[in-house]
Image: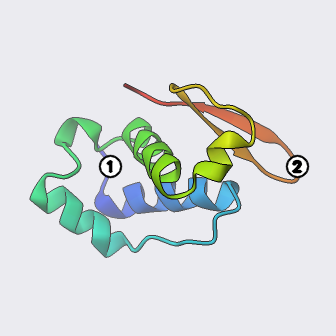
Amino acid sequence: MITAYQFAKTVNALLAAADIEKVLPPQMFYTYYKKGFVKPADQTQAGAVAWAAKYVRKHYPEVMEQEHASEHEIIVVTSERVNILPIEA
């Protein structure tokens, strides 16, 4: 289990790696933890990656279309490399 702050850092690192300038505040994740929007089982690094993938799919679909990602992957494209990150179901 990771803290809401660590969850936010992971999500924001993935957004930055995808060249998305949006920074989500840790306070948002503290609220999500408290209200149960992020279940205890998902309060892990893998859960943060999955959450970030869903967020990118919803708010930045053009990022997902760049490399035709499958439903089980997020593809992070930077100027230096392409990272394919698995998404837990």
Which quarter of the image is occupied by the N terminus? top left
As shown in the figure, which amino acid type bears the numbered disc 2? Glu
Q: Quadrant of residue 39?
A: top left
- Check the image and report above or below for 23 versus 43: below
Q: Depth check: give the residue in front, 24 or 2.
A: 24
Dot 1 corresponds to which residue? 2
Q: Residue at x 64, y 62 (%)?
A: 16
- Check the image and report above or below for 89 versus 50: above
Residue 32 location (% of width, % of height) = 22, 60
Mark 1 crowd level (few <14, some 14–19, many ≥20, 10 Å Cα)? some
Left or right side of 48 for 20: right
Q: Quadrant of residue 25?
A: bottom left
Q: Secondary structure at mark 2?
A: loop
Left or right side of 67 for 79: right
Dot 2 corresponds to which residue? 80
Left or right side of 36 for 4: right
Residue 21 location (% of width, % of height) = 63, 71
Closer to the eye: label 1 or 2? 2
Mark 2 crowd level (few <14, some 14–19, many ≥20, 10 Å Cα)? few
Q: Quadrant of residue 66?
A: top right
Q: Secondary structure at mark 1?
A: loop
Which quarter of the image is occupied by the C terminus? top left
As shown in the figure, which amino acid type bears the numbered disc 1? Ile
- Check the image and report above or below for 56 versus 22: above
